[in-house]
Image (spheres, rainbow, N blue to C red):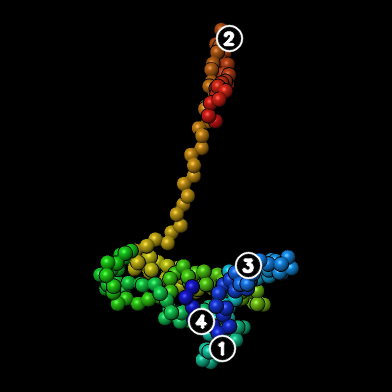
């Protein structure tokens, strides 16, 4: 997600996650240093958590810079939409306009002056992280602005527009189920007792010979 750089953001997602291994002058670690490195690795946040923290800090900075400044308690779905549109200026995904000759072309053969935007997938993932961060920071689920209906509709509109403009499909591909082995049908035989009464017997097919594939 190509967001606005934040001064408090770490330079790497893996900062502190084992940099001492390659930085040892002797090339070997003592048992104490090894166990300390293991504890540090366990305590370091995951890549998802690090990204979520940076996104939350970026959104907080946006609220502080808003005119007039906004508190989190007053933030609504409309403010979330303003934030998402604000991020478009930092996007890196070419979205063709209807007048562009490459509209709907998945692999344009030449450059064009169409604007760069945030990709739908990046915005969708961002909203998911901020929605979780909002509740982790004390927000009530029923008041979560990132789960507002207007935000969902906006993301759907961006997805459909970019799908048409870029000539790509965002629909999830359904996995084909492996064909199940056919079960032989039971054999039904009939007999009669000479008085006109028929009897039906179900006979299962014989088992496969030894060594045959299941």
The residue indicated by pointer 4 is 5
Q: Residue at x 57, y 80 (%)?
A: 9
| Mark 4, other Cα within 10 Å: few <14 / some 14–19 / many ≥20 | few
Measuring from the top left, give residue 82's x and y in whole percent.
48, 81
Q: Quadrant of residue 61?
A: bottom right
The residue indicated by pointer 1 is 64
Which label sits in the foreground, 3 or 4?
A: 3
Q: Earlier in the sequence, mark 1 or mark 2?
A: 1
Q: How far, Cα to Cα, is label 3 from label 2?
A: 91 Å
The residue indicated by pointer 2 is 193
Q: Earlier in the sequence, mark 1 or mark 4?
A: 4
Q: Quadrant of residue 109?
A: bottom left
The residue indicated by pointer 3 is 27
Which label sits in the foreground, 3 or 1?
A: 3
Asked whether the residues under the numbered discs 3 and 2 touch, taking CB atoms below 8 Å apart as contact, a structural biologist would say no
| Mark 2, other Cα within 10 Å: few <14 / some 14–19 / many ≥20 | few
Q: How far, Cα to Cα, is label 3 from label 4?
A: 35 Å
């Amino acid at each position: 997600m190509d967001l606005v750089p934040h001064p408090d953001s770490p330079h790497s997602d893996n900062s502190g996650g084992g940099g001492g291994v390659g930085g040892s002058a002797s090339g070997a670690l003592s048992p104490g240093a090894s166990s300390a490195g293991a504890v540090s690795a366990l305590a370091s946040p995951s890549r998802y958590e690090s990204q979520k923290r940076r996104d939350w800090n970026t959104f907080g900075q946006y609220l502080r810079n808003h005119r007039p400044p906004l508190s989190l308690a007053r933030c609504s779905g409309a403010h979330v939409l303003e934030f998402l549109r604000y991020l478009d200026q930092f996007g890196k995904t070419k979205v063709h306009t209807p007048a562009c000759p490459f509209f709907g072309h998945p692999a344009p053969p030449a450059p064009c002056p169409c604007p760069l935007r945030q990709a739908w997938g990046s915005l969708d993932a961002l909203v998911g992280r901020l929605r979780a961060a909002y509740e982790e920071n004390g927000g009530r689920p029923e008041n979560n602005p990132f789960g507002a209906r207007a935000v969902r509709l906006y993301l759907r509109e961006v997805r459909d527009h970019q799908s048409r403009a870029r000539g790509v499909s965002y629909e999830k591909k359904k996995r084909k189920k492996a064909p199940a082995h056919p079960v032989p049908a039971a054999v039904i035989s009939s007999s009669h007792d000479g008085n006109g009464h028929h009897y039906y017997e179900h006979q299962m097919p014989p088992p496969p010979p030894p060594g045959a594939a299941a």
